[in-house]
Amino acid sequence: MSLPPRPIGSHVPVSGGLVKGAFRVASGIGASALQVFVGNPRGWALAHGDPAQDHAFRDQCAGAGFPAYVHTPYLVNLGSPTATTVRRSLDSIAHNLARGHRIGARGVVVHTGSCVAQGGFDQAMRQVREGLLPLLDKLPDDGPTLLLEPTAGQGQSLCAGVDQLPAYLDALERHPRLGICLDTCHVFAAGAPLDRRRGMTRTLDTLVETIAPVRLELVHANDSKDPCGSFRDRHERIGQGHIGKAAFGELLRHPAVQGVPLIVETPGGKDAWAEDIALLRRLAARKRRSR
């Protein structure tokens, strides 16, 4: 059976291992792409994994045509005023890039962070630049891309939504090893009116205009439990939140998203993920029939 032309999948747990856990779960829910943590998402410990398991996972994904992605831990924040947090964040990003390379991941997702303290924006951006540029320069040609994920605008965010991406990218010289991961819940919470007619289309148009030559390489397709501009990062099932199903139809019709994998990070567990993937696939098929 041939895979659908657009990879659509889910963030999946790695309990049981990358192959017997993550890959098996993704296959069982009808996914054709997946995202994982390669360590504790809420801790600093660097899990080195089993090289044999990593290589087996890489081979499984390659054989099935599944693009794989790694998400860095939630604690990572290069804008922190605490030197220890910045150092640990850099160590974590470097480690996740190395593990991502080993498992054949296309990209490693990192949140753009916050400066925490009022008035600390300029120093925080210097930390981002000084920390990430050397890591980007060292990435091997066959290694993963570092995917910047704008946040929902909570706290003293360094980059929330699409409008703030240009300055962040400029600080990193729009490095060729950078890409963008767009989380629909995040940009909606940060104020993008995705729930309005053509709101998703206009947001994606703005994204294309502002990030070039950096590419959109991954979409986190998540509805939102909270209304537009809430600054709250609370994901909901596709079509069951404030963004609504019509917006995801617009997303799938937009030229900027053609060929870009979609990953759901929605609540409810495996059955819910399977339903959300199937819904996105139906919306994508509807789009293809209407052309």
Image (cartoon, helix red, strand yellow):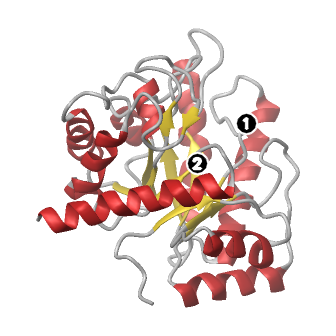
| Residue found 69% across the figure and 57% down from its top | 94
Read off the residue under disc 1: 86
Q: Give the quarter of the figure containing the N terminus.
A: bottom left
Q: In the rendered image of this protein, does residue 118 appear above or below residue 33?
A: above
| Residue found 57% across the figure and 29% down from its top | 233
Q: In the rendered image of this protein, does residue 212 appear above or below residue 15?
A: above
Check disc 1: other Cα within 10 Å, few if <14, some if 14-19, many if 20+.
Answer: many
User: Residue 91's spot in the image, x, y percent?
Assistant: 76, 51
Q: Residue furthest left?
A: 291
| Residue found 69% across the figure and 68% down from its top | 98
Name the element at disc 1.
helix
Q: Quadrant of residue 285?
A: bottom left
Q: In which quarter of the image is residue 42?
A: top right
Q: In the rendered image of this protein, does residue 119 appear above or below residue 70?
A: above
| Residue found 52% across the figure and 32% down from its top | 151
Q: Residue 262 carries which label?
A: none
Read off the residue under disc 2: 265
